[in-house]
Image (cartoon, coloured by chain):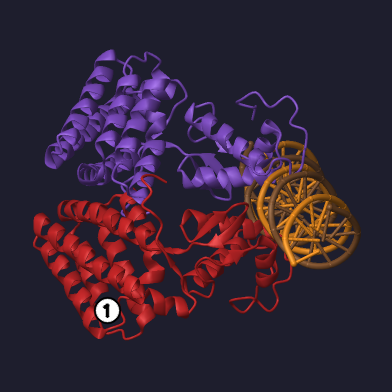
Chain colours: A red, B purple, C brown, D orange
Amino acid sequence: MTAPSPPPSAASARAGADAGSQTLQLFERLRSAVLNLDLMPGERLTERGLEAAYHASRTPVRAALMRLETEGLAQRDGRGWIVAPIDIDEIRALAELREAVETAAVRLAVQRASDSDIAGLAELLETARPTEDEEEVVRAGGDFHVELASLAGNAPMTDAVRGAMTRLARTRWLEVRTPDSREHAWNEHRAVVAALRARDASLASELLATHIRSTNERLVEHLAGERRRLRARGLSIVESPTRPAS
Amino acid sequence: MTAPSPPPSAASARAGADAGSQTLQLFERLRSAVLNLDLMPGERLTERGLEAAYHASRTPVRAALMRLETEGLAQRDGRGWIVAPIDIDEIRALAELREAVETAAVRLAVQRASDSDIAGLAELLETARPTEDEEEVVRAGGDFHVELASLAGNAPMTDAVRGAMTRLARTRWLEVRTPDSREHAWNEHRAVVAALRARDASLASELLATHIRSTNERLVEHLAGERRRLRARGLSIVESPTRPAS
DNA sequence: TACACCAAGTTGGTATACCTAATTGCAACA
DNA sequence: TGTTGCAATTAGGTATACCAACTTGGTGTA
């Protein structure tokens, strides 16, 4: 196992220095490595390997792995750890969850969001528009959905959406490859904001549901179609039999 | 801090013996202590105190605390830890999340659940009926909703419902105090199963939404009303200003 | 009496040593 | 040649020592 990110030059063992910073930084670095596919889905992770690669001791490594596990980015594999595989069934399931939660959230947002809240969301959308940087587009797309959900003023709902977007983050970069689909998604986002601004809960909800569903369908089709090609690039995509419960 | 559960008589430091068992047992004991209110909401937890009280070392204590944090049963408080307070706004928010997720789940269950799946759920309901033990009723009530959600065959949805029920577990015992409300909730559960059996998605969804909403309203009213009395019993209930996001 | 200041204790963060289970490799034997 | 068995290695689980930040209590001075 090699260090996916350049290790800090002087990560000397300053025990206890600026509390939590070490653990948080390590977590962020591991998280980025997983999301950037520097650590490939399905890859084995060993605590001692990460310890060496990131110049941290096992305690913060374990803490980071546990946090990654709760985010669905790492999993236990027997006694050990693996980077969470990309699971096409999970992607489908998360889309269903998102549709349920986000449509409910936007209905609440219609009631609760202030005009300035909505203006802020619209602004976020506008500033994200011109970006050509793919990574930035993906991040902005995820942010939009999280910000939209947050207008419901319901923290657990926001957390649920954020969690789903995190789990989907590694695959969503696939969907924005073409400028077409990029433009398409952006227009749908704008339509949702317009309906929200018009305080039309049913329209906003319906537009959002359609957006989530269609975007996900394209993504899943793409993933299934490109499966062979992606595998050749070292990215394996599993398809677990639908498990009724976790 | 005293040991809320009887410490194991011979919890000698058998390092590494039966892997994970120590950590899991500690987690379960801490979790039970929180859910049983042996550790009171808002109470300070220190890693060294728990280490001493439960005869475990800090490593599994920290792991257990981190897991409790992801379940919403413990929180960071500055550098330290506290048992998660009972937050009436969080309860309201979780009810909204549940309504969104569970109604969507039951609609999916109408399409996907087999007759035997539904029969199993009905059986769970029947066997839970005669129980007079309050704690058992609460557990069964939570189990019902989780099992119902699981019939959608969507693991993230099931996890979301389970997580919400866990966060609500410490307050739900309040709602079943009267045989009336107990009976009431049980009847509503039965009606949902009947609609599910009849493959009537809209009816099942509507019944479930009403059930969740009305049960939660009763609970929140009760909590607000009994706030003073509960505080006298050492149970403080906070009401955080609605935070738009976590 | 009030307040500034310092020392001791407490606490979470980190590093690391040790334990046992599981895996791996090789060798001896059938 | 295939299989069994043991030893070395690896890896996660656990215990614990040490660090720095923070808290607390008391003391001495203004």
Q: Is residue D21 above or below residue B228?
A: below
Q: Position of residue B102 (x, y in %)?
A: 26, 42
**From the viewer's perspective, is A9 left or right of A149?**
right
Q: Where is residue A132 in the image (x, y as percent from the top left)?
A: 32, 86
Residues B19 and A34: in front is B19
Q: In this view, does A70 lie above or below B1?
A: below
When asked about the image quadrant of residue B94, the answer is top left
Q: Where is residue A246 in the image (x, y as percent from the top left)?
A: 42, 46
The N terminus of chain A - image quarter: bottom right
Residues B123 and B95: in front is B123
Residues B53 and B147: in front is B147
When asked about the image quadrant of residue B190, the answer is top left
Residues A52 and B223: in front is A52
Task: Look at the numbered disc 1 and give the secondary structure of its residue.
Answer: helix
Q: In this view, does B6 lie above or below B211?
A: above
Write the residue at 70% across / 76% down. A10
Write the residue at 32% across / 55% down. A93
Q: Which amino acid does label 1 sit on?
A: Thr
Q: Is residue A43 above or below residue B50?
A: below
Q: Position of residue A181 (x, y in %)?
A: 23, 79
Write the residue at 29% across / 49% down. A154
Residue B132 visible in the picture: yes
When asked about the image quadrant of residue A54, the answer is bottom right
**From the viewer's perspective, is A13 left or right of B23?**
right
Write the residue at 35% across / 53% down. A160
**From the viewer's perspective, is A174 left or right of B2?**
left
Query: What residue is pinned by disc 1?
Result: A127
**From the viewer's perspective, is A18 left or right of B99?**
right
Circle 1 marks a residue in which chain?
A
Q: What is the crowding at mark 1: few (fewer than 14 residues within 10 Å), some, or many (at least 20)?
A: few
